[in-house]
Image (cartoon, rainbow, N blue to C red):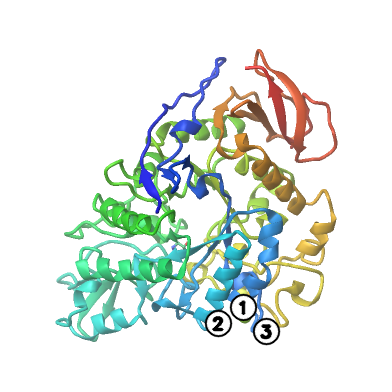
Amino acid sequence: MMRYSTRNTGQAAVRLRGAIRTIGRAGRSSTMVVADAAGSMRRPWWESAVIYQIYPRSFQDSDGDGIGDLEGIRRRLDHACRLGVDAIWLSPIFTSPMADFGYDVADYCDVAAIFGDLAAFDRLLAEAHGRGLKLLLDFVPNHTSIAHPWFVESRAARTGPKRDWYIWRDGRPDGGPPNNWTSDMGGSAWEFDPATGQYYLHAFLREQADLNWRNPEVVAAMGNVLRFWFDRGVDGFRIDVLWHCIKAEALPDNPLNPDFRPGMGEKLAVLQHHSADQPEVHGIAHGFRRLADSYGERLLVGEICLPLERQVAYYGTDEAPGVHLPFNFQLFDAPWDAAVLARIIADYEAALPPGGWPNWVLGSHDSPRLAGRLGETQARVAAMLLLTLRGTPTLYQGDELGIGKVTIPPDRIRDPQDLRQPGLGLGRDGARTPMPWDAGAYAGFSTVEPWLPLNDDWPTRNVAVQDKDPASMLNLYRALLRLRRSHPALAIGDIAVLPSQPDVLQYLRRQDDETLLVALNLGGRPRSVDVPQGMALHERLLSTVGGPGEASALAAGEGAIMRVEGR
Ligand code: NOJ
Ligand code: MG
């Protein structure tokens, strides 16, 4: 049996302007320490782990329908192992009409037929575990598909036992929707259902009806969903839009957004003060956590898109812990500027609650491709940043190949968010294109035309080509992951951000006797490394541009990891 206890052994300190202050200490890093049967203490697995996100539709097709599937993922597990990640997170694989590509679940306890079946899932899980990989699923608690039997029953009559499992209201006296809430996908968040003459709430598509988390039966039913998969052996969950799960009870109008301009997407027309991030959501998160902890060392990652202070609240408290890792998306749209990034890192570290373990994300199936945003050179620097910051990194499939912006021809657009609000640049298909494995037909992804186009440069930008090129993005990622594994300072050590000089972001990572200096040149001019007083540069362990280089020089757009001596 495992035992868990919370521990808060350190205090935050920031090093800025001259003197070093350590901002993240290994000692305060654990939401929990784990005692094994022999009583020895160790960190939970995810603190030193790297998570790799797989978008199942686009990883590998095994049955010739142009859509990725579980058997395809199983056959490609070697890629994750050779990359050197520790855990795989699968975007939703459950039964679904796929209006939002699986984020509209019609049966939480079965696998969508296009992806396979439960037996295929069990094979994948067993093989992943056999290779030492953890497997995380994507739990979608805020809403179900309108094809879910719960909703079918709920919509059938005002008086049915499942009516209150969803959020139904009468329209306003003029017949309009009950309040002014807008859907994240555009338009009103309310859909009128003529069958019973009321509206139901949907924070996303009208095909995704919001569950009523104030109803204890919903809480119990969703707990059973988690148990179903934990009993099957999964190692944890990413929790979809956790901060949306409960709404202000009286459903008041949201304040209008004074900064809203046409062309921003209707989601932003109002401020989501009453429709999301309600105090009661922390009780829900704590319930998930208690359930997960009852299975041992299981990880919960929460999707939370909020300003820093409210985002870190999802760690919960000592008495009522929340998720282990509230996703930290701050690097997504941060200006690529050394001083800004230094500030983001320092502020985040300082905002973590005692025992809160940090995490960083740079790409996902919802955001523009990293290399498309930064260009290839800086995407390499970004990879070094992601994999050398203190905290658990999550990598998104395809970023390890440096896939850039993929333009989707209008007739191939599939993302409902783009189709509903065309021309606003909200499309997510560009981040969801199939993995290019080799230069064969359809890049080795499928034997037929894939559901989305491949990246234009797939004949040269694919796994097989990059595998053979020591200077490729893929081999840079592999080298970074190897280094993280062999230098605990990078995975679990303290961090101290150094004062930024123009274009250069520098920080120290320290664990036991080892101190490493990470210096990232975010600009296009050569710069030098600013070695902290009392320290001497020792050996260079890795550079994003390769070659030995002069120890203290940084080429344009170069990132380097160096060992330093002294304190
Ligand atoms: C966040 C998911 O990442 C996104 O793809 C989805 O559309 C929404 N949640 C709704 O479930
Ligand atoms: Mg398939």
Ligand 2 neighbours mark 1 (CB distance < 8 Å): yes
- The secondary structure type at the circle numbered 1 is loop
Q: Position of residue 241 (x, y in %)?
A: 39, 59
Q: Are marks 1 and 3 in contact (CB under 8 Å)?
A: no
Q: Does the beta carbon of the residue at mark 3 sit less than 8 Å from ligand 2? A: yes
Q: Secondary structure at mark 3?
A: loop
Q: Quadrant of the C terminus?
A: top right
Circle number at residue 561: none
Three-letter amino acid code at the position of disc 3: Gly
CA gap, disc 2 and disc 3? 11 Å
- Neighbour class for label 2 at 10 Å: few (<14), some, many (≥20)? some
Report if the CB atoms under discs 2 and 1 are less than 8 Å apart.
Answer: yes
Q: Which residue is mark 3?
A: 64
* Quadrant in which ligand 1 is drawn: bottom left
Q: Tag 2: residue type?
A: Ile
Kind of element beneath mark 2: loop
Q: Nearer the viewer, residue 21 or 268?
A: 21
Q: Amino acid at mark 1?
A: Ile
Residue 516, image x and y in percent? 66, 29
Query: Which is nearer the N-term, disc 2 or disc 1?
Result: 1
Real-space CA distance between mark 1 and mark 3, rounded to the nearest whole angstrom: 8 Å
Residue position for label 2: 114
Mark 1, Cα crowd under 10 Å, few <14 / some 14-19 / many 20+, is many
Provide residue 118's location: percent of width, then percent of height.
50, 79
